[in-house]
Image (cartoon, rainbow, N blue to C red):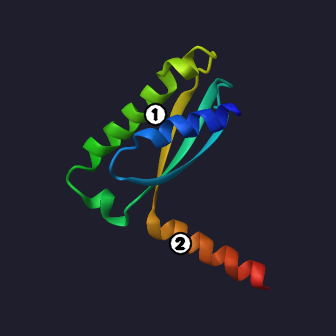
Amino acid sequence: MTESERLASELRKHPPRFVRDFSLTLDHDLDDDPAVFLWLVIDDDAFERPDFFKQRDAARRWITEALATEALATEGIERWPYLRYRGVSEIKSDEDASAHESAH
């Protein structure tokens, strides 16, 4: 299993309740430090909810704890997490656009 697959597997165990899905990319940040870039798919109205910042903090703890798990830490996987958020409708819109392009 690759590093990316191991991390994704760990993250799928206990995602925050407002995360509907996620995708991740392992790369380096602008300082050339190892990083994990996560796109979190959340409900479209999540940004408007009064508890959004609380949920955002829970998402940061979720990825930090996953990166710190013994299984990943013992393999020397040390990456800084960068979180980005996308609404469900953005994903649907991207899928519709891709389907339209492939039909032509």
**Nearest to N terminus: mark 2 or mark 1:** 1
Give the image quarter of residue 77.
top right
Residue type, mark 2 in image? Lys
Q: Secondary structure at mark 1?
A: helix
Residue type, mark 1 in image? Ile
Give the residue furthest to the bottom: 104
Q: Would residue 63 be found to the left or right of residue 7 on screen?
A: left
Q: Which mark is residue 63?
A: 1
CB within 8 Å, label 2 to label 1: no
Q: Nearer the viewer, residue 81 or 23?
A: 23
Q: Would residue 98 be found to the left or right of residue 68 on screen?
A: right
Q: Which residue is label 2 attached to?
A: 92
Give the residue furthest to the right: 104
Q: Bin the neighbour count of mark 2 within 10 Å (Cα to Cα): few under 14, some 14-19, many 20 and up.
A: few
Q: CA distance from mark 2 to mark 1?
A: 25 Å
Identify the residue at horizontal 58%, vertical 25% (top origin). 79
Identify the residue at horizontal 58%, vertical 14% (top origin). 74
Q: Quadrant of the N terminus?
A: top right
Q: Nearer the viewer, residue 64 or 32?
A: 64
Give the residue furthest to the left: 50
Q: Which mark is residue 35?
A: none
Give the image quarter of residue 94.
bottom right
Residue 17 location, x and y as percent? 32, 49
Give above or below for 22 relative to 3. Answer: below
